[in-house]
Amino acid sequence: MSFLELKDLKVHFPIRGGIFNTIQDWVYAVDGVDMVIEEGKTYGLVGESGSGKTTIGKAIIGLEEVTGGDVEYEGVQVTNKARSRNEQYRNYNKDIQMIFQDSTSSLNPKKRIRDIIAEPMRNYFDYTDKEEKDEVIRLLEIVGLNEDAIYRYPHEFSGGQRQRLGVARAVASNPKLIIADEPTSALDLSVQAQVLNFMKQIQKEYGLSYLFISHDLSVVKHMADDIAIMHRGRFVERGSKDKIFNNPQHIYTRRLLSAIPQIDPLNREEHKIERQKVEQEYQEQEIHYYDENGRVYDLESFDENHWVALNPNDSSSKTLVADQEKGGN
Amino acid sequence: MATKETLLEINNLEVGFRFSDAYHNAVDDVSITLKENEILAIVGESGSGKSTLATAIIGLHDPNNTQIKGEILYKGLDLTNLNTKLYNRIRGNDIGMIFQDPLGSLNPVMPIGKQIEESLIYHTDLNEKQRRQRVLELLNQVGIPNPERIIKQYPHELSGGMRQRIVIAIALANKPPIIIADEPTTALDVTIQAQILDLMKDIQEETNSGIILITHDLGVVAETADRVAVMYAGQIVEEAPVDVLFTDPKHPYTRSLLNSIPHELEEGEDDELHVIQGTVPSLQNLPRTGDRFKDRIPWIPDEAFDENPQLEEIAPNHKVRGNSWKHFYFEGEED
């Protein structure tokens, strides 16, 4: 069942200048994105820096003003209402939570862990002191931290532990969706593994959904069910993990996938040749995949659970893909 | 294959930092050599001492609070007790350095061309015209389109990938035989990362130089390095050619690290990633005797660990510290 839907979501930032600080131009950070979020699934949002992936996350949770389009939560229009104190949107605020990339700056350094994790509970539930404390301890245990952490301050923890505290806080309000914006990109490999494990475990326990924003394709591959590839503020391709990784259609997706370093030193020469082939192809055919303004085309259904933004008027890009498949890719 | 000449030889290097009047070694007993025409990768997590090692080679540690023991031999010269004047001649001329953050390592108020030219002014007696020629040549070499225009621009006008190319051009300016690259692609997107790594490899093949590549990204290592040294808590725990390290890792730390890489799940596979228990001890609390990785694999019996584990050659070119690897198995697995 889907509970959150983005319809033609747009976030544009004005560029101001001139004598009167008037709006000179716009940055189309997110420019027409559709997405449906279902219960218990993980959605990967992948793109290079500046592609607008973080902006989508922030727009959903209300940290960024939506310029156009709708965010619908359980059929209710909640666009730009996420920070509203109105009772009507209370559930929405409670059900959508976020984990940030930088764990140091996302935890209040002056508060003890107990207060940090209890804050969402105090906002949404009427717990007694005892209940609240038990709940905090229970959450800490879920993310693998000890009970005596509750009286300590954020700086006393390592980066990985702090990121787990961030996870615990996000789970505290018993949400349906957690937006995780690069949750592990500041962490070492072994610590990253730990945080990812806890995130998966919590998902099983609570049946919650993740919107997993990352530039690291190997992490997304590990976590996500569905993946959307973003470029220039729009989706170039969206589909199940399997479709994206095994049958990518858009030239940009193929370029991104071929650029991932592979742990296979014996065949690295082949990777390099393949990578440079795709890169050259990208340079030559880029024009077929974007309209005259460099905008990504609208997504169209390509296959079951697989959408690609190909030129609707021009069949060259499509036939090209078909040719390559014949040629054994 | 003809035997490669050794460029840099590091013997029993110790780098200690001072905390309240005692020195604590961040790099402890590291011995390694860099040969010409190879990329030596140094891998480790944060706090393993890999950047400290690089900084020691290029002599950028604060002499008042750092204690360096052992030798770093370059052309028979021990770099550890070189005076600043001599060191300045070597830095930039014989050893080029590429840092992680291209914006931080470029001067924001100096045009690109000037910054590249700077090291030519210090180290060569080319005249102005020749220097300009060389700058344009370098920019071409690192694949920058339109070099005539770029030399007049400032760093903030360029993208991250372009800036990193400029930093590489600066490092290459005097054709140094040794290049040290400290996380050169960590701040870049994957597509740019691939381009920069290809570029570094091409340059290395062209100039026969030796590159020390410091990174935490095992994918980058697998794609570019010829030889790999894995560092843990200031020591090298394993050193091997790249294919051997990834196909036949021996040391418990290397194996644990490789196991914690996120990967696609096979049908029915447990989706838990391997986690290394505990944390890297801080410098002051680091056990200085015994096996430093012991605390993180508590299910291995005490007898498996050496009292004083040494880096030993177990096969040609494959070195492993201590003997604990012979008894190591993952928790939950049978021996």
Image (cartoon, rainbow, N blue to C red):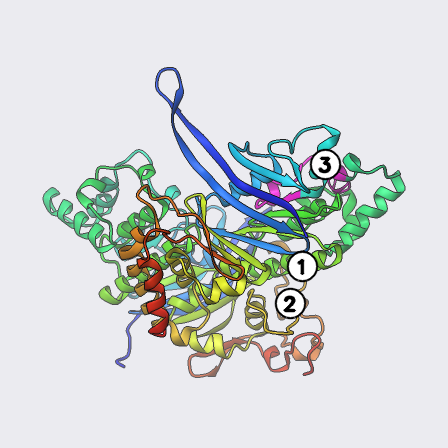
Q: Tell me the SS state at disc 1.
A: helix
Residue range of the region highlighted in magenta in the rendering = A97-120
Identify the amino acid type marked 2: Asp
Chain for numbered disc 1 = A
Question: Is A124 displayed left or right of A192 in the figure?
Answer: right
Q: Earlier in the sequence, mark 3 or mark 1?
A: 3
Q: Nearer the viewer, mark 3 or mark 1?
A: 1
Residue A98 in magenta stretch? yes
- Give me the disc on residue B162: none
- How many residues crowd mark 1 within 10 Å: few (<14), some (14–19), many (20+)? some
Residue type of the residue flagged with mark 1: Lys
Q: Position of residue B335 (x, y in %)?
A: 67, 83
Circle 3 sits in a helix, a strand or a loop, which is it? loop
The residue singled out by tag 3 in the image is A111
Residue occupied by mark 2? B271
Distance Cα–Cα, label 3 vs label 1: 28 Å
Task: Name the residue rendered at 33%, 73% in the picture.
Answer: A327
Q: Chain of mark 3?
A: A
> Would residue A208 be counted in the magenta stretch?
no
Residue B77 can be seen in this image: no
* Residue B178 visible, this angle: yes
User: Would you name the residue on which mark 1 appears?
Assistant: A200
Res A200 quadrant in image: bottom right
Q: CA distance from mark 2 to mark 3?
A: 35 Å
In 3D space, how far apart are the residues under numbered discs 1 and 2 (Cα atoms)? 8 Å
